[in-house]
Amino acid sequence: MRISDILRVKGENVVTVPPDMPVEVLVTELARHRIGAAVVSRDGTAVEGIVSERDVVRALAERGPAVLAEPVSTIQTTQVRTVTPDAQLEDVERLMTERRFRHVPVVVDGRLAGVVSIGDVVKNRIDELETERTTLADYITGERS
């Protein structure tokens, strides 16, 4: 399975935030969209960074509540690992596990095309296991279609 298959199911909508957005506003946006990370981008297409709940928590622990008034650029991750829609899901799973990423932007020709989260990966695996279980149960009981 490829990342494009995941995006086809979940959609290509991505929440982006500008690097000068205050962290306090970022927190509100993450909560409003019920997401754990946002891609940092001035134009909504170029990936300049990624910022997650973990980044906020770490910055709060290090610098205190004053970090909420700072721009997102002070806490974002700038060395972002991206993948293409043709990337194999297994490779992205391995990347997420080994590097402890929960979100990976998907890029096509330098333009943001989506984000795959660990939740998307887990949902896909559960769906695959359920399909396999149903197929095996149908085979055992003779209820093949």
Image (tube, helix red, strand yellow):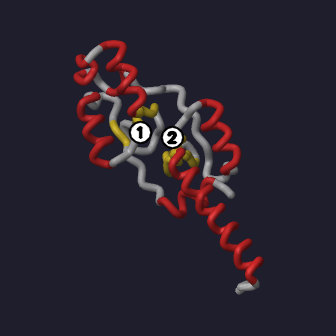
Question: Which residue reaches farthest front?
Answer: 141
User: At x 69% / y 67%, what residue is drawn?
Assistant: 132
Q: Position of residue 49 (x, y in %)?
A: 46, 31
The quadrant in which residue 66 appears is: top left
Q: Which residue is mark 2?
A: 103
> Is residue 36 rendered to the left or right of residue 66?
right
Which circle's residue, 2 or 1, is located before the other in the chain?
A: 1
- Residue 112 screen position, x and y as percent: 49, 46
| Figure check: 99 above or below 103 | above
Does residue 64 appear left or right of residue 98 in this picture?
A: left
Q: Report crowding for label 2: few under 14, some 14 to 19, many 20 or more residues within 10 A (C-alpha).
A: many
Is the C terminus in the top left, top right, bottom left or bottom right quadrant? bottom right
Do the residues under discs 2 and 1 have CB atoms within 8 angstroms? yes
Q: Spot the residue most to the top.
A: 63
**In the displayed structure, would residue 145 be above or below residue 80?**
below
- SS state under label 2: strand
Instruction: Examine the rendered structure and indicate whether residue 144 appears above or below residue 60.
Output: below
Quadrant in which the N terminus appears: bottom right
Residue at image point 54% right, 26% down: 79
Which label belongs to residue 37? 1
Q: Residue 46 at x, y = what percent?
A: 46, 39
Q: Amino acid at mark 1?
A: Ala
Q: Residues within 10 Å of mark 1 (few under 14, many from 20)?
A: many
116 sits to left or right of 2: left
Residue in front for this viewpoint, 101 or 133: 133
Q: Secondary structure at mark 1?
A: strand
The image's mark for residue 79 is: none
